[in-house]
Image (tube, rainbow, N blue to C red):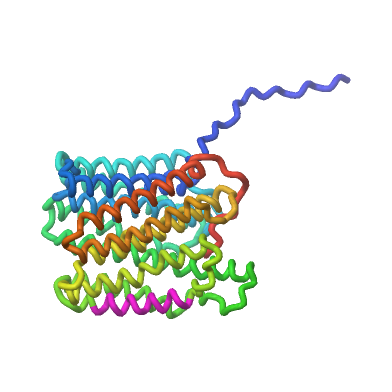
Amino acid sequence: MPAKPAPISITEPAARSHPFWSGAFRPLFLLAGILALVAVVWWVAGYVHGITVPSLGTPSFWHAHEMIFGFGGAAIGGFLLTAIANWTGRPPVAGPKLMALTSAWILGRLVIGFAENLPPLAVIFGALAYFVFLIALGARELIAARALKNMRVLAVIGIIALFDGLFVASCLDVIALDPAMLYQTAILTIILLIALIGGRVIPAFTRNWMQREQISAPLPVLFGRFDMVCLASIALAIITVIITPDAALPGYVLLMAGVLHGVRLMRWRGVHTWREPIVAMLHLGYFWVPVGLGLLGASMIWPDVIGSRDALHGLTGGAMACMIIAIAGRAALGHTGRELRASMMLNAAFGLIWFSTLFRIAAGQSNAHYVTILAIATLMWVGGWLAFLIGYGPVLLGPSQKKTGGIPVR
């Protein structure tokens, strides 16, 4: 009896999206780098040369919003969704969902850029759309995997989103709150998130490297009770800034927090990592957390010595930007199957941004040469982010080289 012929399938293979949409770290880290250039160069050009700059009440508030909630928000989303995939063992958020999230972020940049010409409520809702979508995606993944212990990260991001809405509303005179107090507390909340995440990944990555290289030295101290005290010190600083923004009390709390986080950093044994830049830059980036907290505290106690805006750059240009470069560079390599080895471009990017923070703080201390030193800091900042985009843009845009295991930190 003749065998039946095999059925012929005419089903088309499922369409695959571009590798760029395979993980949140790709579009969001890339967009964070682009905005880091645009928001700084545009604002400095407006300040020095009088070029028209978007205004959120004032051009300075637009600049502050985009660097805190736009730049910082994109980096937070890129890390969060990448880490959640590893924490839960679920496939990463990709494809249409990631495209929608990225579109929400771009929408936020547009409504903030045209805030003066739009209804205030439209600006507020447009600015918050990205954070609401990000939290919803993160909660969905964590609930599906029953990884509820990581909801605390989403809680901190929710507070950042709250400050975003309040800051925009205050800039547009919808509510009678001080915008400067709101962006200070928003920055401190992002630093709290960096301290929470950094306290997990920095000692773990350092310990793994020291064991692999057989470094004969005490290993980094992993997350414990002392770390909880360090986190509580930042939370206390946020509360005191909100309750008594014009008093010296928040300054003393911030100085205390700076000391605690300085001790915390030393417990991670970063002094042994000088041979491996991709590990060392995590410690050098976190260095700006205690320094920035201390400078901000000093600006509240001795305002004639250092201004709060200059001090805040230790936390934004220093802690935020340097930790973003360190984490984004590592993610770009590790999650596309490449060797975890810092390239010349990543080293250049990190070094330029790290030193640009020094010059930006120094600019505020030199009235006679303010514009000159600010220009040096700006050129270093621009050079650093150009180096990142040139070196890692192709990695973020291109295909992975092999299957990767994600971020091995719980």
| Most foreground residue, 410 or 398 | 398
| Most foreground residue, 122 or 190 | 190
Query: As drawn, is 118 to the left or to the right of 67?
Result: left
**Would you say residue 266 sits in the magenta stretch?**
yes
Of all residues shown, which one is farthest toward the right? 1
How far across and how far down the image is residue 105, in percent? 33, 45
How far across and how far down the image is residue 179, in percent? 17, 59
Query: As drawn, is 250 to the left or to the right of 177?
Result: right
Figure check: 27 above or below 261: above
**Would you say residue 375 sits in the magenta stretch?**
no
Q: Quadrant of residue 245 in the image? A: bottom left
| Most foreground residue, 408 or 270 | 270
Q: Quadrant of residue 10 in the image? A: top right
Figure check: 22 above or below 187: above
Q: Tell me if residue 335 can be seen.
A: yes
Residue at 52 percent across and 52 percent down: it is 343
Q: Which span of residues is magenta-colored?
A: 252-267
- State how many labels appear: 0
Residue at 23 percent across and 75 percent down: it is 298
> Which quarter of the figure is the N terminus placed in?
top right
How far across and how far down the image is residue 390, in percent? 45, 44
